[in-house]
Amino acid sequence: MPESGSLGSVGGCSATGIPTANPPIRHLVSSRSAAAGRKTRELQDRRDSRPPSTVFPGAAGTRAATVPVPPLLASGQEPALAMRFRFHSKAAFHVGRRSFGVDWCCMKPGERGSPVKYLVLGLSLVASSICAHPHGSVAQVSIHSAAIAENVVGESADQTFAVYLPPSYQAGSRRYPVVVLLHGLGADNQVWTKDFDVQEMLDGLIDTGGIQDLIVVMPNAKSRFMGSFYANSPITGRWEDFVVNEVIQRVDHDFRTIPSRRSRAVVGWSMGGFGAIRIGMHRPDAFSVVYAISPCCLDAVEEIGNANASAWGGILQFKKYEDVDAAFKGSNLWPVAVFGLLVAIDPDPAAPLGARIPVARKDMFIVPLEPGFREFRSRFPLQQVSAYRDNLCKLSALGLEYGFDDEFAQVPTATAAFSRALNDAHVPHTLETYVGDHSVRVRERLATMVFPYLSRNLQREP
């Protein structure tokens, strides 16, 4: 049964199931079909150049939609993470992954000259850090989790999570909104600080005024079976409770947070997007803002469906947990990933390996076993929108996005279907679609869309 929370009527759905006159976020953004190819790219080009909150026509077969535009793009500036300062010669140079140019703030009024002069000046700026923005910090916190300790597969109850503190944190006594950032399958929470340079990204966004000052919490969810899916399971542990109860309680205790749901957001990528949506459906008493980037596993379709013979055929061969470990070591990842999902969201402690396998092999094919496969599919967010509609309506903001070229077919298919189900249930949300795959543009999207969206919708200290 859905958890009701104790929030009152703070969402954007009325008691009759019709959106209120003034929903808490800009209204529904229709999904744009990948078949709209050229038209979609034209719309994206127009979107990138339009002023904030302009209405533009949807692709063929869709209605007009109002899309929020982050302040950085609306003002015509480059995203802060790019570290690119423009001047009339367009000259720039590169150091590692960063691009550098000349910042006008570092020149005397009226000063002009050749591109070479500016290039030399730019190099000196890098060396002297004259124009460097203030830096935040990242703290590593150790925690013993009673929730994770309740597992039967050997997951460690001793975990760590990272906490980004904004540059202003050390200088005063103010309190800050909190964003919980959930990573994807096969990774751990270090992906945010090492691969995505989240600290540098947030420093730049805060320095340019693109977002308000935030505390960002990055818990770990890597597990024996590649990932916990942030789910409560008697087999793998109560990872949702770990994040929502234990981590949040520790962060509120150790750091100057605003300890209110209205000032908390949960956002995730891939498996983390799945986790963010489920946490939002289950625990609107803890979070008011949810955002999912290329969320996996919203329905048992495509790679998760019974047609994926590689995944389910491999699972049928598992007789003990060591077989799962051997598949992972042999880079046979699909059986491991789908098995991890199965024991996370549809566990059965009485069954071998802790889960009932909802498929069987018949001749050369993998076929669903009913009612088992239907019950398995009922555990997915798409199938639970109606059951959790009241909780979803308590969210003040719900955002989804995916790239048209995502290499995991389930992501665009199920995310678009999830958005349609939210529409049918009259749950206000935004859906952003763009030209891109599962991972290449994630850092850009975080800086230009996701963090500005969260910042706009999180309540700050009065």
Image: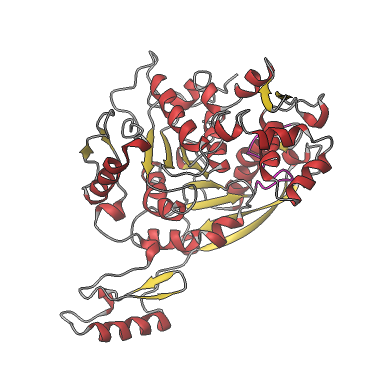
Q: Which residues are magenta?
A: 221-233
Looking at this view, is 4 or 154 the one in front?
154
- Residue pushed farthest front? 363
- Residue pushed farthest top? 16
Vertical comparison of 36 with 162: above or below: above
Q: In x, y percent, where is residue 70?
A: 32, 49
Looking at this view, is 399 or 342 the one in front?
342
Residue 112 placement, left or right of 272: left
Q: In x, y percent, where is residue 379?
A: 61, 24
Residue 232 visible within the image: no
How many numbered discs sit on the rendered protein?
Answer: 0
Vertical comparison of 451 with 165: above or below: above
Q: In x, y percent, where is residue 384?
A: 54, 22
Q: Main secondary structure of the magenta part?
A: loop
> Is 213 a magenta residue?
no
Q: In x, y percent, where is residue 270?
A: 54, 43
Vertical comparison of 165 with 422: above or below: below
Q: To which quarter of the image does residue 318 belong?
A: top right
